[in-house]
């Protein structure tokens, strides 16, 4: 394995490998499944506008901060704070990240499991000639059936564990490099298809025309949460990945490119989902099932749709896999390096524990659908709290650490690769991580909780 950092740690081999692996973490169900359903529930165009605002004000600075911290410390999230701030309570960020990883992977693996079921369904021609109403019924029947969703969830967790176990470069980098560009091509084809559907323009209008009357503080919170979730920030996954980045990589460009790729993917997913919703009369507020109703409907109505469907769900499963490995890696790196158990053991114990919690998320669409906590099913609670509470909280602490604790010199040094590169707009970056990003996060939290009002 490549040892690019010279410290004996496993690392990413090439510049493209870095981009592909981090983009692999960022691009996943968050873009294609979660973004359209949350945007659909929260006003469409208005949500998109807030989302892009949050990506700029919070997403980019937090992503840069995570990469800076990880590469500076050459360690995973928890270890990084121990190294950079010995004896200080900043390790709480690492601990919070482990909680987030558990919560995210538990419900994410449920949905990732659905993608596997849909690969099989599309392979067996089950999409033929069905209407959107029939797809809705099939989907609801499937998720409430418990057994298959559970089996697929476990298969998915098993695949994740195998890749994490195989190690950084051989596993993560190789897969991401080949398959992510393929997903992009397919998504573009589908967007063109959807936009040219009869009535598709109505959907486009819903998606890009901001209706400001739809904006509430709750919508802002959800846009912020979606931005954090989609960019994989706020839990230290990118701190760990940052530690694998070669010393000569320009972190600011890497963060920008990944943000553009991730946001582009989400927007493309919107350009597929919303025109199709209007064309096929599907309800935009369908919730977590939205993508699993819309996409099959598009495929069933499209020439060659069977083949496209197989490819699409396969690539979506892979995109999810490159995300879940980055989440599991947070837990495994902590367990193996901190608790001093072997990587193998850490992977097995970590993935079993997460799968155990995940079972409840899957069952909350079936036999446990009546179990409600704070009025939400277990799945909804995990989905909601990870994106809207845990990740923004982690993001807040991360920018505060970078802006106020890491030290100007260290930050500049990491951004300039030890003064080899010219750092443009350093003052602006520092101002954003010190003031803008933290103030925005705190403000949105307090406003949406109704704590401040004026
Ligand atoms: N960003 C991933 C997605 O969009 C999910 C994720 C969240 C991965 C947090 C890592 C950390 O699917």
Image (cartoon, rainbow, N blue to C red):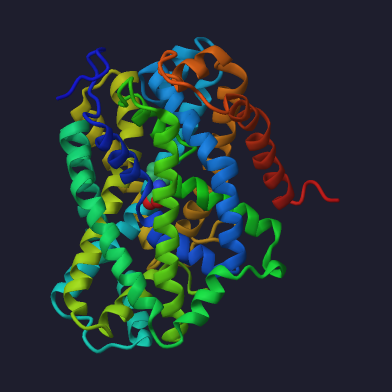
Q: Where 216 sits versus 234, above or below?
A: below
Residue at the (45%, 15%) spot, across then down: 82
Say whether residue 115 is left or right of residue 255: left
Which residue sits furthest right? Answer: 454
Closer to the camera in the image, 203 or 235: 203
Residue at position x 20%, y 67% in the image: 119
Q: Can you tell which quarter of the image residue 307 is in? A: bottom left
Position of 374 with respect to 423 (left or right) is: right
Q: Is residue 82 above or below residue 209?
A: above
Q: Residue at x 48, y 74 (%)?
A: 286
Q: What residue is at 31 percent from the left and 39 percent from the top? A: 19
Estimate the x, y position of residue 446 in percent, counting from the top left. Answer: 72, 45
Decide if residue 427 is in sight here. yes
* Quadrant position of the N terminus in the picture: top left
Question: Residue 306, image x and y in percent?
Answer: 18, 77
For the residue pair 296 and 18, the one nearer the viewer reads as: 18
């Amino acid at each position: 394995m490549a040892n690019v950092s010279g410290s004996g740690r496993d690392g990413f081999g090439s510049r493209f490998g870095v981009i592909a692996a981090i983009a692999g973490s960022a691009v996943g169900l968050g873009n294609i499944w979660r973004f359209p359903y949350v945007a659909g529930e929260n006003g469409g165009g208005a949500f998109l506008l807030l989302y892009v605002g949050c990506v700029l004000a919070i997403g980019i600075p937090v992503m840069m901060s995570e990469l800076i911290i990880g590469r500076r410390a050459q360690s995973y999230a928890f270890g990084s704070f121990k190294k950079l701030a010995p004896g200080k309570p900043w390790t709480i960020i690492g601990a919070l990240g482990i909680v987030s990883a558990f919560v995210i992977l538990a419900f994410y693996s449920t949905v990732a499991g659905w993608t596997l079921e849909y690969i099989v369904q599309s392979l067996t021609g089950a999409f033929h000639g069905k209407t959107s109403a029939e797809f809705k019924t099939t989907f609801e029947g499937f998720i409430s059936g418990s057994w298959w969703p559970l089996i697929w969830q476990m298969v998915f967790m098993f695949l994740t564990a195998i890749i994490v176990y195989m190690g950084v470069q051989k596993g993560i980098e190789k897969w991401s490099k080949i398959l992510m560009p393929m997903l992009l091509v397919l998504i573009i084809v589908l967007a063109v298809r959807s936009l040219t559907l009869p009535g598709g323009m109505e959907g486009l209008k819903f998606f890009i025309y901001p209706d400001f009357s739809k904006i509430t503080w709750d919508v802002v919170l959800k846009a912020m949460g979606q931005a954090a979730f989609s960019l994989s920030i706020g839990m230290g996954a990118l701190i760990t990945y940052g530690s694998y980045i070669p010393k000569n990589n320009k972190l600011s460009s890497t963060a920008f490119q990944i943000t553009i790729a991730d946001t582009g993917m989400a927007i493309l997913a919107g350009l597929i989902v919303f025109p199709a919703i209007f064309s096929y009369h599907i309800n935009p507020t369908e919730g977590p099932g939205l993508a699993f109703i819309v996409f099959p409907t598009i495929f069933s109505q499209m020439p060659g749709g069977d083949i496209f469907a197989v490819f699409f769900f396969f690539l979506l499963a892979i995109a999810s896999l490159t995300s879940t490995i980055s989440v599991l890696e947070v837990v495994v790196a902590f367990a193996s390096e901190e608790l001093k158990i072997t990587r193998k053991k850490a992977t097995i114990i970590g993935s079993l524990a997460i799968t155990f919690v995940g079972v409840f998320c899957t069952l909350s669409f079936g036999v446990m659908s009546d179990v409600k906590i704070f009025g939400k099913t277990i799945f909804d609670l995990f989905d909601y709290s990870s994106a809207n509470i845990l990740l923004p909280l982690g993001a807040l602490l991360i920018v505060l650490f970078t802006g106020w604790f890491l030290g100007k010199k260290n930050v500049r040094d990491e951004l300039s690769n030890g003064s080899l590169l010219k750092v443009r707009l350093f003052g602006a970056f520092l101002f954003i991580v010190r003031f803008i990003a933290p103030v925005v996060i705190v403000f949105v939290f307090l406003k949406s909780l109704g704590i401040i009002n004026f």
